[in-house]
Amino acid sequence: MQAQELISRSRPYRWMLALTVFLSLLGALASLAIPWFAARLLGGLLERGTSLAPVAGLLVTALFIQTIIAITNALVSGSVSARVLADFRGEIHAHLQRLPLGFHDQSDRGDLLSLMAWDASRLSTFISHWLASAISSIFLACGSLAVLFSIDFRLALVMPFLFALFFMGQKLVGRKLRSISAKVREAEVNVIATAQQTLEMLPATKAFAREQLQDQKYAQNLEASRNQNVRQSKILAYLGPANQLLIAIAVIVTLLLVSRGSATQSLSATDLFGFLLYAALLSRPIGLLANLFGELNGARGSLERLLEVLKENPEPGYNAPSRLDTCRGIISFCDVWFGYPGRQETLCGANLEIKSGEIVALTGDNGSGKTTLAQLLLGFYSPQRGTIRLDGLDIEQIQVQDLRRLIGYVPQQTLLFNASVRDNIGWGAERPDEQRLMRAARLSQALEFIESLPEGFDTVIGEHGVRLSGGQRQRLALARALLNDPPILILDEATSMYDLDGEAAFVEACQTALVGRTVLLITHRPASLELADRQVHLQQGKLEKLS
Ligand SMILES: Nc1ncnc2c1ncn2[C@@H]1O[C@H](COP(=O)(O)OP(=O)(O)OP(=O)(O)O)[C@@H](O)[C@H]1O
């Protein structure tokens, strides 16, 4: 199954891979020619009769050709590997973005990062050279065997037994190698996850003086990863050389045994050298195949994990039948039930009708489900029972990107990235223009502070907007949501960090800006509550009318 998958994943690169196979075969041919000329050179040295210059010239030419082929091959397979890596990463990245939030809630960020960084790299290296290595190694082994048999049939008879021994050995270590490879991956995932956590938690780590604890945690993960890597490299370290040693001993023993009979007496010095050199050459593809086998076990683990993630279904909303460019903004929650996996139900038959252009404030205790309700409207999660409608259409029937384009969403936690203010606000629209950008910034009460920044709209704000205050970050998030002029707005505690003046100015500006939009306002702030046409309260999974 995985072999098939590996082959089918190699298919898009078949021409480049065919070129590496061709070059590897040429390289193998040159490798086969070298002992031939070398044996003649050594035999000639002993027999001292003939001129050695032509054979020496041919040997040097063969060595040159082999070197040029090896360089070209490395360049081609390096470029295949880079392409496969980029393609894999692009595919995983696109897929992860389209998976439901429910998948990401349950996933380990370190595991997903490892998939893109580590597994993709291991797989791309393997795919870029496994075919060429396997075919050229088999060709080289068969070629060496053929020459050995042509030199002396009886002496060469021992070689096929060696092949049988080789494959039995691989079978024996294969299972062990696979299980260690899975453990190596697990340990690497933990290392990456801890490093990521350390960087994200840094302000808290410093505030609670927990640097040592994080160091210990990281050191433990490093130790586990080191142990597994050492276990794996021990097996790999033995695998190739042990096979080569096996061949070398077999050749020596064969020579000793047969030297007692008459066979070696009928061999010339050139044939004897030839036999030894080809036997030595035979050990190279055997070693290569053994290494390839080790890599295959690692690549299988990576492929397994990759396929596991790729087989997760994207949000069904991407393939929903209805397209929607615009809407009136009539929203209804009809008997909506929802619970997160393994948790008690958050919504138990929630009902809410919002008219077009109405501003509804949603209140409720912490954890009562206000954000959940908003995220259900955005299609982040699907209700287990009941329906949510927009303009009378079940939102599950609406193409999810259309749905989300119609809704401006300011989440409770501002999500900003390490780029300029302009890029962060402009991210909210497909083609942001300067005029709309200014309007959105003015409306969210962000313009004044943006203009006071060292480079105004071009100021880079750091990871998660770390170079701004909490309130400033929130203003940017709000500006981003307003940029697109969406007919529906969800403001989830969007002004919770505004100072009183800022909030009052925002509320003032909203008197006109929110006209004509349907707004779901999740807030407890009295000034913001004043904006609402009516209030509903979420309690025990149900919505109650307050005013
Ligand atoms: N991704 C999640 N996975 C599992 N449970 C979740 C998830 N998100 C929220 N919850 C749980 O669902 C419940 C409702 O959470 P929600 O964030 O909707 O509440 P809220 O009313 O918005 O709270 P707050 O006022 O504190 O923002 C809580 O008990 C919370 O622990």
Image (cartoon, rainbow, N blue to C red):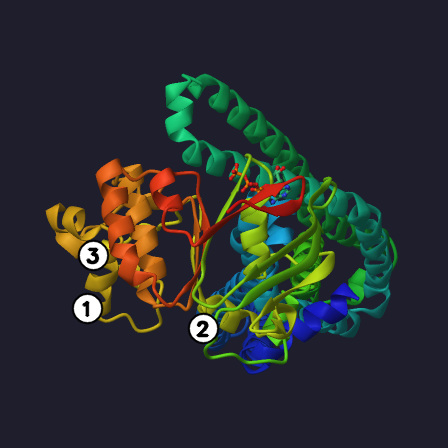
- Ligand 1 found in image quarter: top right
Q: Residue 55 placed where, x, y %?
A: 51, 75
| Badge 1 amino acid | Glu
Residue 521 sits above or below residue 54 on the image: above
**Residue lying farthest to the bottom in this orientation:** 15
Q: For this view, does 378 lie left or right of residue 530?
A: right
Identify the disc placed on residue 235.
none
* Residue beneath disc 1: 434
Quadrant assignment, res 440: bottom left
Q: Nearer the viewer, residue 463 or 145?
A: 463
Q: Mark 2 or mark 3, which has the lower sequence index?
A: 2
| Badge 3 amino acid | Arg
* Residue beneath disc 3: 442
**Residue lying farthest to the front in this orientation:** 547
Could you say whether the residue bearing mark 1 is in a helix, strand or loop? helix
Marker count (numbered)? 3
| Badge 2 amino acid | Thr
Identify the disc placed on residue 72.
2
